[in-house]
Every structure is written in C-alpha cells, then in structure tokens.
Image: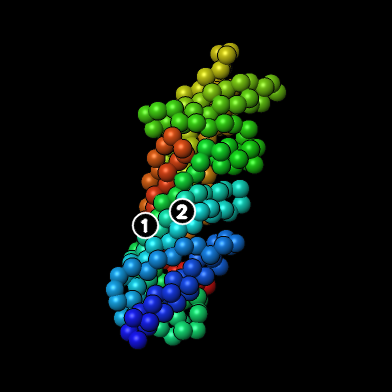
Amino acid sequence: MLGAAEWLARVGAESVLARAVQERTGVLEPPEVEVHGSPVLLQALRGRYDDVEVDVDTLSSGPVRLRDVHAELSGVYLSFHDLLDGNTDRIYVERSAEQALLTYDDLDRYLRFTGRPLDAEPAGDGQLRLTGTVDVLGGARPVSALARVAAEEGALLVRPEELSTPVPLDGVEEALLTQRFTFPVPLDPLLFEDRGVDVTVQPDGLAIRTAGSGVVLGS
C-alpha cells in the first residue's frame, strides 16, 4: 500500500510539473520531468520537492531556438491540494540551474531572420567566426569577422574584434560593418534565467548556462 502511494505521488508530481512547463513554453510534447529523493510521498504532503530535473529537446521563442535544454530545480513548491487538483497556477522554484545549446545552424537561422545573412562557426580561443556578403555604402562586400560572445541583460551579445575584407576599409566602412556584426540574441526561450548567464563557444554551438532564484512557473 505504501509503495503504491509513493508511486502515485511521484507520477502525479511529475505529471503536474511537466504540464506547468508545457503551458509556460508552448511545447507540443510534455517535457521529461523527474522528481528525485525519497520518500516522494512525504515531499508531496509537505508541498515542497527537494530536487527536480526537467529536460526539453527543443525550446523556441520567435526566431530563437535552443536545443537540449536541461534544468535542475531545488525547492519546488506545489501544495498537496494543487497536486490533487492538477493546478499549475502557483508553482514556485527556490533555485534553478539551466543549460541549453544554441547550435550554429540555429544561430545562422536567427541571423537570416533578422536580416544578417551570415554563417557562424567556432574560431578557437573562445571566438566565433562570422562570414558573409554585406551591403555597405551601396556596395556588397565579402566580410569575415572574429567575434566574442558575452551575456548581457537577458541576451547573448556578439561583438566583432577583427574584420577582414579583400579590399581595405576606410573609417566609415569599418564603423558600419562593426555595427552590422554587433547583435544580440535574446534568451527568451529559457525557463528559469533571472540571475546569471554564462556562455561558452563549443564545436557544436554556444553552450548556455544560467542560474535563477525565486521563479514562478504558473500564472
């Protein structure tokens, strides 16, 4: 009997939390949710889950698409009454750590959507290489840029450090191209970011890690 109650508490909590994430993100398939620790029944009765993991294959918001989203949550509050009712309106998360991948294909897709037909790839030393043909002062120029990526105000900000063109640039052209190759990538798809973001240039894309606290999942 106790084993069945423990199983029901775990399955019920995972189902409600998965639906809360699905409602918040709009993903078509419920995410994978695992409630850890034992006994889960005691956690359910007190309305606080110590350790929860959430996995989503793909999250999108507008033109931004992130892959392999994984979140580790500590202190997830879901009252026993709301668990029984399946109510997702008042789920509070004390602390979160989230990671995701922005692949280069998805970054290229975002750049084209925002009017920058550029291709991105890793360039070593934590840099990106951006290449493309860019209109400047009425003419089309093939340009390659080495750029750094940093987190800034809920977005990734890409800034060029070095521009390379077949023909030398004058001061005005260089300033315009620098502006053209400087752009933000919003992190709207992320679930729990509210405090800190780190980004690393990897062979398969930009690895994003975030930390959050005091996040409300429901409305």
Q: Which residue is mark 1?
A: 97
- Mark 1 is surrounded, within 10 Å at the Cα level, by few (under 14), some (14 to 19) or many (20 or more) other residues, namely some
* Camera-nearest residue between 173 and 51: 51
Mark 1–mark 2 contact, CB under 8 Å?
A: no
Q: Nearer the viewer, mark 1 or mark 2?
A: 2
Q: Is residue 138 above or below residue 24?
A: above
Q: Earlier in the sequence, mark 1 or mark 2?
A: 2
Spatial CA span between label 1 and label 2: 11 Å
Q: Residue 177 sits in which quadrant?
A: top right
As displayed, is residue 75 above or below residue 130? below
The x, y position of residue 21, in whole percent, is: 50, 66
Q: Secondary structure at mark 2?
A: strand
Q: According to the image, what is the colour scheme of the structure?
A: rainbow
Q: Residue at x 47, y 24 (%)?
A: 162
The residue most toward the left is 38
Look at label 1 and name its amino acid. Ala
Give the quadrant of residue 13: bottom left
Q: Is residue 46 visible?
A: no
Q: Is residue 178 left or right of residue 116?
A: left
* Residue under pointer 2: 69
Amino acid type, label 2 = Val
**In the figure, is residue 34 to the left or right of 59?**
left
Residue at x-position 29% and y-position 76%: 39
Numbered disc 1: secondary structure = strand
Q: How many marks?
A: 2
Q: Residue at x 45, y 58 (%)?
A: 55
